[in-house]
């Protein structure tokens, strides 16, 4: 309940600090609105607390959505003017939110939806499918981060569990720190692709025996990885920098791609 108490304190502080004559933001609980666990077709001019499993359909929330641990939020065709503070699980579809902040043990699934700001925090797992993140993505997972057919406009930083990327576009950098079993397949990265401190092996541009070309407009930087890294056909417009990699197979597939810059360190021919 410490996390809930902290959020309550924040909401109350905002209410106290409101200008004279301004109504403090109301807080509505999902349990007060739901019929058989569903809330449909309303325009809610307040914050929303997900205190029970709650399925929102065709709903507008003009404040922030907060979720309790153990309560699952499901949304379809929902617009949240502010953002989501998630400690419980959330499944978003055809939804637009301002930002997402995650705290364990949350798990997040986003499909065909838009986050106008950033996605940050810690979670068990994150799945983004046909999604757009207009800000940064900076999340530590204990299980997996899966990005499929997704665009991230800011920088992307992942830590912790597995990282699996298919058919996605990163307008900034893509930085994997301490992930296990990293797979990047058919991706476009306009900044640098950096992989460091792997806890399992990585495959960049190759999945199994199948090549899956990826394009890196910046440099590819592989550093301090104690596990093997397999490279497929990467189009690298910057440099290929490899230092401190000690995996049993080293870095394989160095001749499979196209490098327009220079190879540095262990990747030097």
Image (cartoon, rainbow, N blue to C red):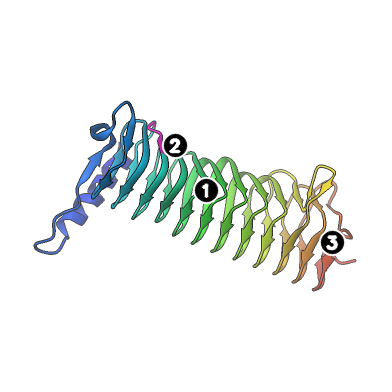
Mark 2 and mark 1: span between their CA atoms?
18 Å
Q: Where is residue 183 in the image (x, y as percent from the top left)?
A: 71, 48
Left-right relation of 201 to 29: right
Pointer 1 local density, CA inside 10 Å: few below 14, some 14–19, many at least 20: some
Report the disc number at residue 48.
none
* Magenta span includes 231: no
Task: Residue 79 in the image: state x and y as whole percent.
Answer: 37, 50
Residue numbers of the magenta segment? 70-74
1 and 3 marks in contact (CB < 8 Å): no
Q: Residue 248: give x, y in percent of width and height.
A: 83, 46
Residue 40 is left or right of residue 224, and the answer is left
Q: Residues within 10 Å of mark 3 (few under 14, many from 20)?
A: some
Alpha carbon separation for disc pair 1 and 3 = 32 Å
SS category of the residue bearing label 3:
loop
Nearest to N terminus: mark 1 or mark 3: 1
Residue drawn at 16 percent across, 60 percent down: 18
The residue lying furthest to the left in this view is: 21
Give the labeled residue for mark 1. 112
Note whether 5 is above or below 219 in the view shown. Answer: above
Disc 2 target residue: 89
Q: Are marks 2 and 1 in contact (CB under 8 Å)?
A: no
Most foreground residue, 85 or 48: 48
The residue lying toward the viewer, choosing from 265 and 158, is 158
Instruction: Classify residue 35 by image quadrant.
Output: top left
Magenta residues: mostly which secondary structure?
A: loop
Which residue is identified by label 3?
257
Which is in the foreground here, disc 2 or disc 1? 1
Q: Where is residue 197 in the image (x, y as percent from the top left)?
A: 67, 52
Residue at x 78% of width, y 64% of height: 235
């Amino acid at each position: 309940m410490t996390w809930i108490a902290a959020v309550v304190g924040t909401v109350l502080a905002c209410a106290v600090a409101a200008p004279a004559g301004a109504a403090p933001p109301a807080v509505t609980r999902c349990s007060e609105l739901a019929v058989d666990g569903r809330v449909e077709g309303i325009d809610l001019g307040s914050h929303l607390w997900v205190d029970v499993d709650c399925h929102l359909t065709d709903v507008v929330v003009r404040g922030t959505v907060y979720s309790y641990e153990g309560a699952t939020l499901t949304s379809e065709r929902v617009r949240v003017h502010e953002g989501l503070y998630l400690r419980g699980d959330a499944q978003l579809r055809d939804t637009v939110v301002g930002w997402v902040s995650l705290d364990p043990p949350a798990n997040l699934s986003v499909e065909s939806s838009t986050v106008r700001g950033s996605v940050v925090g810690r979670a068990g797992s994150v799945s983004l499918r046909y999604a757009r993140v207009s800000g940064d993505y900076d999340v530590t997972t204990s299980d997996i981060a899966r990005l499929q057919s997704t665009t991230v406009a800011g920088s992307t930083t992942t830590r912790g569990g597995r990282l699996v990327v298919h058919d996605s576009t990163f307008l900034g950098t893509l930085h994997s720190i301490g992930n296990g079993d990293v797979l990047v397949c058919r991706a476009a990265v306009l900044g640098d692709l950096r992989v460091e401190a792997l806890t399992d092996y990585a495959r960049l541009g190759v999945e199994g025996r199948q090549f899956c070309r990826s394009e890196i407009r910046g440099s590819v930087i592989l550093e301090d990885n104690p596990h093997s890294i397999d490279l497929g056909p990467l189009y690298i417009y910057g440099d290929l920098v490899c230092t401190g990699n000690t995996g049993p197979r080293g870095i394989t597939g160095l001749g499979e791609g196209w490098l327009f810059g220079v190879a540095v360190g262990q990747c030097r021919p």
